[in-house]
Image: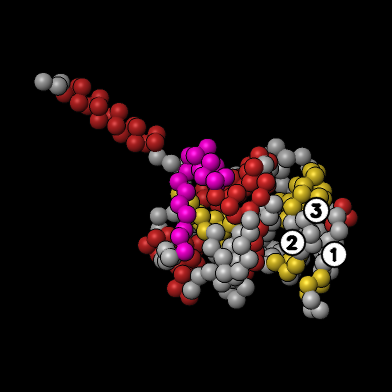
Amino acid sequence: MLSKNFLCTCVLALLCFGTLSAQQFKALLVVQTAGWQHESTFSALPAMEKMAARHDFKLDLKQRAMPVNDKMLANYDVVIFINTTGDIFNDAEQMAMEKFIQSGKGWVGVHAASDTEYDWKWYTDMVGHMFKIHPVVQTAMVDVHDSSFPGLEGWPKRKMWTDEFYEYKDGTKKEGFNYLVTVDESTYDWQAQWGPDNKAKGHGDFHPMSWNHEYDGGRAFYTNFGHVPAVFEDPDFLQHLYGGIWWAAKGKR
């Protein structure tokens, strides 16, 4: 017959195991598009799975047929948009997403997340700067403005980077935004023109690449990096991205 003390020890061990094995937060990954499909998305998926395993958080992939609603989103702490494009949510899904953020949760956007849902003002206000045009992929120098932000502690103040640098419809500084990384326009050819009405103008001395801010009760983080598939194998980028995810999910820095 098992002793009372032995049973108590087993129960305590199981409780401790359950506490220790609990993942630190839950994330929903959205890669749905209604337009351009980025090649780097196919590199992002395994990279995100490895990141979740490395940092012990739960990661679920939203399937296209899976509707977003209050009940579903209640399971998550952060929603991550990687290379989403166009109108991906209907009105009911948009309302559920707004409630999610208003409840104190987080959003993370990567690259083409700023080329998504232009007609949803709440979303465009959350993103902050929406995509307008980009030049060809090339190398430039980027500057870190907040080395204390999670994931940027190991970055130098100035760093060489190869990617697709977006120009935004409005690149001016916005009140309440914390700008993390900018790109130096003097170090690359930012010129581009798509048809007669869409021509790059440049953002001048301040060209944002990554930022975060508190928004409508929750948190939002965005990084422009992530067009080149190999970026999702770059330890510096992955640390930068995880820092944004951790901040958006936990509100810690």
The amino acid sitting under disc 3 is Gln
Secondary structure, mark 2, is loop
Which mark is first along the chain, 1 or 3? 3
Where 30 sits versus 196, above or below? above
Q: Label 3: how many residues lie within 10 Å, few (<14), some (14-19) or many (20+)?
A: some
Can residue 211 be seen at all in this image of the molecule?
Answer: no
For the magenta stretch, what is the residue range? 46-64
Residue drawn at x 55%, y 42% is 51
Residue drawn at x 60%, y 76% is 119
User: What residue is pinned by disc 3?
Assistant: 138
Which of the 4 image quarters holds residue 65?
bottom left
Locate the N terminus and report the quarter of the image it occupies.
Answer: top left
User: What residue is pinned by disc 2?
Assistant: 166
Q: Label 1: how many residues lie within 10 Å, few (<14), some (14-19) or many (20+)?
A: some
Residues under labels 3 and 1: Cα distance? 12 Å
Residue drawn at x 79%, y 76% is 195
User: What residue is pinned by disc 1?
Assistant: 191
